[in-house]
Image: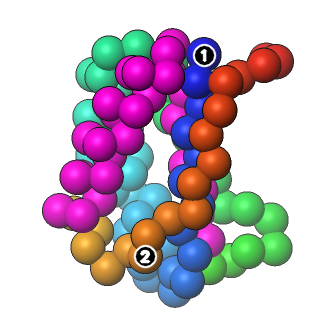
Amino acid sequence: MYVLIREYDGLDTKMRETVTQKANTELRPLLAKSMGFVSYELIQPDEKSDTVASISVFDTRANAEASSKVAGDWVRSNLPSLTKPANIAGELVAH
């Protein structure tokens, strides 16, 4: 399995709530239709009240990378004020 982690910083409370709501009701169902989808989670990291991070898991790197384009296009269209995320990606080695 392959994991993509995206961290978006600099969010005020209202924007964080908007991101959370839209990611849950719009983006997650879209990603769930992607080939090889395993899971999508959104977290608010401890001690980072201005941040949200998404964790996407797919069965292969190719499917994860394809979904990344879908998610990136969705973010640009639906949440254009979000800053470019910090990215971490890699093989899931234990679960």
Q: Read off the magenta span.
A: 51-77
Residue at image x 27%, y 22%? 33
Give the x, y percent position of residue 50: 62, 79
Tell me the kind of residue under disc 2. Thr
| Tag shown at residue 83 | 2
Residue at image x 49%, y 22%? 61
Dividing the image into 4 quarters, which one contains the C terminus? Answer: top right
Magenta segment includes 62? yes
Identify the secondary structure beneath mark 2.
Answer: loop
Rendered position, 14 above or below 64: below
Nearer to me, 50 or 4:
4
Mark 1 closeness class: few <14, some 14–19, many ≥20 residues within 10 Å: some
Identify the secondary structure beneath mark 1.
Answer: loop
Q: Main secondary structure of the magenta part?
A: helix
> Mark 1 sits on what residue?
1
Give the x, y percent position of residue 65: 40, 33
Q: Is residue 27 visible?
A: no
The residues bearing labels 1 and 2 have C-alpha atoms spaced at a distance of: 27 Å
Dividing the image into 4 quarters, which one contains the N terminus? Answer: top right
| Tag shown at residue 89 | none
State how the image is colored. rainbow
